[in-house]
Image: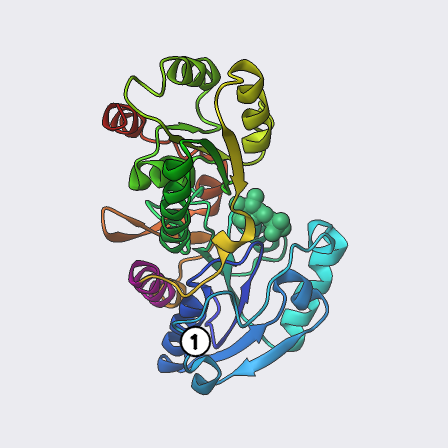
């Protein structure tokens, strides 16, 4: 095994609050251990296009509290091709970058595992996505901040929903995962949730509405995960419900990209700092092709294959918590 003298760091895919705290942690832990650090801009695309700059400790000053990513990000189509990955590897060699730290979601970890396999590059990943959909880690960087943003927005929607006695459908992000929706609904006392992991929810929802939001309520709020919801997301559901229950005043609100912004919460800053530090420790100890996660408050090394392929199940009990507490 060759000794690692320099590392490259990049952020890829959708940005997430806490990515900057992770960049800071990785950079400073690497420099502390005598490694050279290269910041790679715009994710894998920047690696292909040689958008690379040496980072000193000052490059990451005053960024722990900032949302987004100072390294910028991209979803690189070119990197999905063997030719693109070969160009990326050429630039690693050109700058004598021995190893990579990749911060991102499942697409980013997939890209990392290809590069690692094809060119025998040591790579360690950090789970950076608001979706919380990477297996092997209890949480991902950005999830807690997005959850708090959702809570803030839904609390505000409740004020107007209550005042007008309305039925509200609120769409949140999460792609194919219902973590943001389900826990967001619990945190805001919503009446119901529609998530990709559960199939029979529409009938249940109709029953809930037919029973006058379970007996005593004049307004109700339902959080819906975006993407493949067969009912057409929050907008589609609102329309369907209006057709079925013309007496109800139905509205819909799509939270969109505001969920990805903002200053990271304490939980995300600490998670990013711990996992960023652990990423360099792992590389120095000869670990490769793993994503650093946290399980039961302990740092864990999750093989890329597991982090990407395994489904991360939602806790069914949480659905009961939501439904019992919203009677
Ligand atoms: O993966 C993070 C995420 O915000 C998903 O929740 C969402 O489906 C997607 O990215 C949106 O991506 P884009 O910003 O490219 O529209």
Between 270 and 279, the one lying in front of the other is 270
Please tell me which residue is depicted at 27% across the width and 27% down the height of the picture.
Answer: 326
Closest to the observer, 302 or 275: 275
Quarter of the image where the C terminus is located? top left
* Position of residue 282 measured from the top left corner of the image (x, y, whole percent): 36, 62
- Place of residue 42 in the rendered image (x, y in percent of width and height, measured from the top left): 63, 66
Residue 113 visible? The answer is no
Q: Is residue 194 above or below residue 103?
A: above
Residue 14 rendering spot, x and y as whole percentages: 56, 54
Q: Is mark 1 within 8 Å of ligand 1?
A: no
- Residue 24: image quadrant is bottom left
The quadrant holding residue 39 is: bottom right
Q: Residue at x 31, y 30 (%)?
A: 315
Question: According to the image, label 1 marks what residue?
Answer: 63
62 w.r.t. 66: above or below: below
In this orientation, which residue lies closer to the viewer: 313 or 8? Answer: 313
Can residue 16 be seen in the rendering of this structure? Answer: yes
Look at the numbered disc 1 and give the secondary structure of its residue.
loop
**Which residue occupies the foreground of this view, 93 or 147?**
147
Q: Is residue 210 magenta?
A: no
Q: Residues within 10 Å of mark 1 (few under 14, many from 20)?
A: some
**Which coloring applies here?**
rainbow
Prevailing secondary structure class for the magenta stretch in the rendered image: helix
Q: Position of residue 136 (x, y in %)?
A: 37, 42
Residue segment shown in magenta: 266-278
The image quarter containing residue 189 is top left
Tell me which residue sits at (30%, 41%) in the image: 187
Instruction: Reply above or below: 202 against 261.
Output: above
Q: Which residue is situated farthest in the right direction here?
A: 83
């Amino acid at each position: 095994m060759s000794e690692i003298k320099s590392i490259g760091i990049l952020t890829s895919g959708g940005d997430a609050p806490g990515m900057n705290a992770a960049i800071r942690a990785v950079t400073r832990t690497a420099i502390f251990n005598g490694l050279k650090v290269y910041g790679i801009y715009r994710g894998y695309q920047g690696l292909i296009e040689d958008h690379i700059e040496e980072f000193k400790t000052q490059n990451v000053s005053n960024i722990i509290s900032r949302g987004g990513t100072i390294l910028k990000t991209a979803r690189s189509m070119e990197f999905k091709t063997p030719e693109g990955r070969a160009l990326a590897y050429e630039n690693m060699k050109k700058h004598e970058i021995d190893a990579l730290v990749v911060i991102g979601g499942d697409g980013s970890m997939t890209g990392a595992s290809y590069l690692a396999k094809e060119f025998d590059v040591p790579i360690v990943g950090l789970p950076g996505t608001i979706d919380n959909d990477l297996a092997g880690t209890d949480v991902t960087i950005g999830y807690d901040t997005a959850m708090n943003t959702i809570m803030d927005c839904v609390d505000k929607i409740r004020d107007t929903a209550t005042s007008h006695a309305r039925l509200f459908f609120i769409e949140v992000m999460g792609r194919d995962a219902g973590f943001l929706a389900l826990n967001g609904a619990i945190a805001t006392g919503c009446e119901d949730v529609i998530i990709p992991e559960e199939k029979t929810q529409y009938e249940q929802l109709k029953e809930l509405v037919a029973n006058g939001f379970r007996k005593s309520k004049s307004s109700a709020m339902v959080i819906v995960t975006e993407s493949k919801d067969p009912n057409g997301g929050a907008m589609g559901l609102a329309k369907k419900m209006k057709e079925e229950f013309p007496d109800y005043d139905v509205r819909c609100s799509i939270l969109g990209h505001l969920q990805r912004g903002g200053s990271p919460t304490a939980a995300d800053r600490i998670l990013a700092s711990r996992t960023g530090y652990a990423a360099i420790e792992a590389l120095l100890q000869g670990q490769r092709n793993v994503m650093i996660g946290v399980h039961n408050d302990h740092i864990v090394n999750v093989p890329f294959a597991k982090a990407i392929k395994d489904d991360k199940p939602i806790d069914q009990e949480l659905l009961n918590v939501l439904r019992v507490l919203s009677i």
